[in-house]
Image (spheres, rainbow, N blue to C red):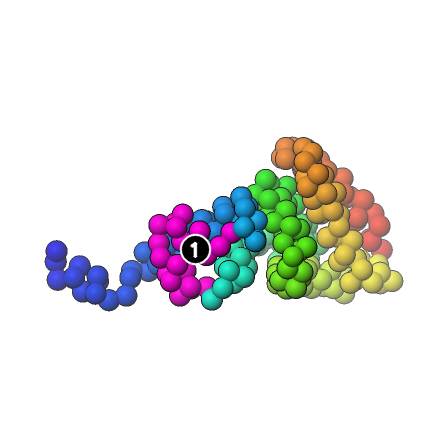
Amino acid sequence: MTERQAQRRQGRPAAVDVEALNGLIIDTAKALFIKEGYEGASVEKIASLAGIGKLTIYRRYASKEALFIAVLESMSTGMWETPQARAFVDAPLDALKARCRVILDMTATEEGLAIYRVLIDAGTRFPELVASTVSKMKEPVEGKNLELLNQAQKQGQIRADIDIRNLGRVVSSMVTGWTLLNGLLGEEGLRDSEQRSQYFETAWSVLMLGIRP
C-alpha cells in the first residue's frame, strides 16, 4: 500500500465512495419500501440487505421517515435536467408541455406506480407522514407549473379570465389523473410509449383549445 493510499484510508472516504454508498442505501431502501410497504420496511432490514451497519444509514438519515423522503426525492432527481424539460426557456407553454410529458412518463412506470401504492398504504396508518411527504413532492412541481402558467397569461397566451391556480389543478389532473387511477387498478394504462404519446398530444390539444384567447 502506498503512502497516498494509507492516508486515504485513514481520512474521509473518497467522494466516489460516498456517492456509491448513498446510491446503495437509496436503491436498497426503495426496493424494500416497494416490496414490504412503509410499515414493513425498517432501517435494520435495509442495512442488512445492503450489507452495511444501520449506524451508517443513521449518519445520513435521522429516521426511516427521512430515508423514505430521500427515496422519493431520488426518483425525481434529474427529471427536470433532461433536454426536453430544460428547453423553451422563453416559451412558457412549451416548457410546461415538456414538463408535463416528463411527469406523465414517470407516473406511467411500474416503479412510479409502486411508490404511489406505498403512499396509499402508509396513508391509512401514518396520515400526517404521507401528507407531509406528498406536500414536499408536489411543491416544486406545482410551483414551477404555476410560474409558467402565470408567465404565459402575462404574455397573452392564456385567457385573462382564467384562474391560474385552478388551471394548474386541471393540468395536474390531465397529466396524472386517468393514468394513475388506471395503473393503480392493475390495468395496462399507458405503459406503451406510443399510446402514451397519442394520449398526451390529444389531451394537450384539448387543453390549448380551452385556454387560448
Q: Is residue 149 above or below residue 208?
A: below
Q: Secondary structure at mark 1?
A: helix
Q: Residues within 10 Å of mark 1 (few under 14, many from 20)?
A: some
Residue 128: percent from the left, percent from the top?
Answer: 66, 64
Q: Residue at x 35, y 57 (%)?
A: 53
| In the image, residue 53 lies in the stretch drawn in magenta | yes
Q: Quadrant of residue 135?
A: bottom right
Q: Is residue 180 above or below residue 164?
A: above
Q: Residue at x 21, y 62 (%)?
A: 8
The prevailing secondary structure element of the residues shown in magenta is helix
- In this rendering, position of residue 151 left or right of residue 68: right
Give the residue type that dot 1 points to: Glu
**Residue that sits furthest to the right in the current view:** 161
Which image quarter holds the C terminus? bottom right
Residue 190: percent from the left, percent from the top?
Answer: 67, 36
- In this rendering, position of residue 149 left or right of residue 130: right
Residue 137: percent from the left, percent from the top?
Answer: 62, 59
Residue 183 visible in this rendered orientation of the protein: yes
Q: Quadrant of residue 95?
A: bottom right
Residue 66: percent from the left, percent from the top?
Answer: 52, 63
Q: Residue at x 38, y 62 (%)?
A: 55
**Front residue (pair 115, 125):** 125
- In this rendering, position of residue 193 left or right of residue 82: right
| In the image, residue 9 lies in the stretch drawn in magenta | no
Q: Which residue is mark 1?
A: 44
Magenta-highlighted residues: 41-61
Which image quarter holds the N terminus? bottom left
